[in-house]
Every structure is written in C-alpha cells, then in structure tokens.
C-alpha cells in the first residue's frame, strides 16, 4: 500500500532576529516583523520554496536572521496563527513569567556580603 502524498498547507517564513533573538516573520514587503499577521503567506509549494529562498538570503547574505524555517499556519479570515502548538508557544512568548530583576534579567548580581555584616 502506498502512502498518500502530504497535503500542502499554507506556510510563513520564521526565524530569530540576529541582534535580539526575537522570533520574527518575513513580511510581504521583505521586512521581518514580530507580528505573524504581517507575514507573507505562501499558499502553494512553489510559493513556499520562493519565500524560503528569500528568507535564506536574509540569513546567509544579509545576516539579519538565523534559523530560517517554514511553519504551517491556519487562516481564519484576517486572523493568522501557527498550526502547531510548539510554534504557537514560540510565537506567543514564554509560558512562564520571566524575572524582572536580578541576574536573569540582565541586572548585575548583588555583591556578596561579609559574614556578620
């Protein structure tokens, strides 16, 4: 029994901004945006291949982003969201509250105190 070919679903190009590490999406205008709503959506395999080629140029030649990938998206009218839970979490940000002070947030660590001080 042969396998059925995988059905193509619309995709967007995503990566991490090289200067900040932020998750970004390649827009219709060629700019990278933190908002998936701004992303160029490839509706066919050929469009997806062309979109990834442009995104890889931004990575390899222009050094704007790293870890370029295509992710499947779900469209509901004007609303766009990643199809996979992993990408939804990646797009939405951490699932925990990040510290706002201390070494984890980039603030300098407190100097150690002398015993008895």
Image: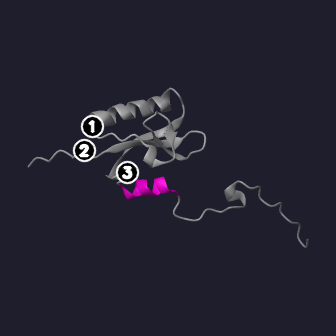
The span from disc 2 to disc 1 (Cα, nearest Å) is 7 Å
Q: Which residue is mark 2?
A: 8
Quadrant of residue 49 in the image?
top left
User: Label 1: which residue?
Assistant: 45
Instruction: State whether residue 103 is above or below residue 45.
Output: below
Give SS at disc 3: loop
**Quarter of the image where the C terminus is located:** bottom right
Q: Outermost residue toward the top?
A: 61
- The answer to whether the residues at label 3 and label 2 have Cβ atoms under 8 Å apart is no
Instruction: Report if residue 85 lies within the magenta region.
Output: yes
The residue segment tinted magenta is: 84-93
Camera-side residue of 77 and 82 = 77
Query: Label 3: which residue?
Result: 78
Residue found farthest to the bottom: 116
Front one among 60 and 71: 71
Q: Residue at coordinates 14% horizontally, 47% vertically from top-left?
A: 4
Disc marking residue 74: none
The stretch drawn in magenta includes residue 26: no
Q: Are marks 2 and 1 in contact (CB under 8 Å)?
A: yes
Question: What kind of element bears circle 2?
Answer: loop
Between the C-alphas of marks 3 and 1, the distance is 21 Å
């Amino acid at each position: 029994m042969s396998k059925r070919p995988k059905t193509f679903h619309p995709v967007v190009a995503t990566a991490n901004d090289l200067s900040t590490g932020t998750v970004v999406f390649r827009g219709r205008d060629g700019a990278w945006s933190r908002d998936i709503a701004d992303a160029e959506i490839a509706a066919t395999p050929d469009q997806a291949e062309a979109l990834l080629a442009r995104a890889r140029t931004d990575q390899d030649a222009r050094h704007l982003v790293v870890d370029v990938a295509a992710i499947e998206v779900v469209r509901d009218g004007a609303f766009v969201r990643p199809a996979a839970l992993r990408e939804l979490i990646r797009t939405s940000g951490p699932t925990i509250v990040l510290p706002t002070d201390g070494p984890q947030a980039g603030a300098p660590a407190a100097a150690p105190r002398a015993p008895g001080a």
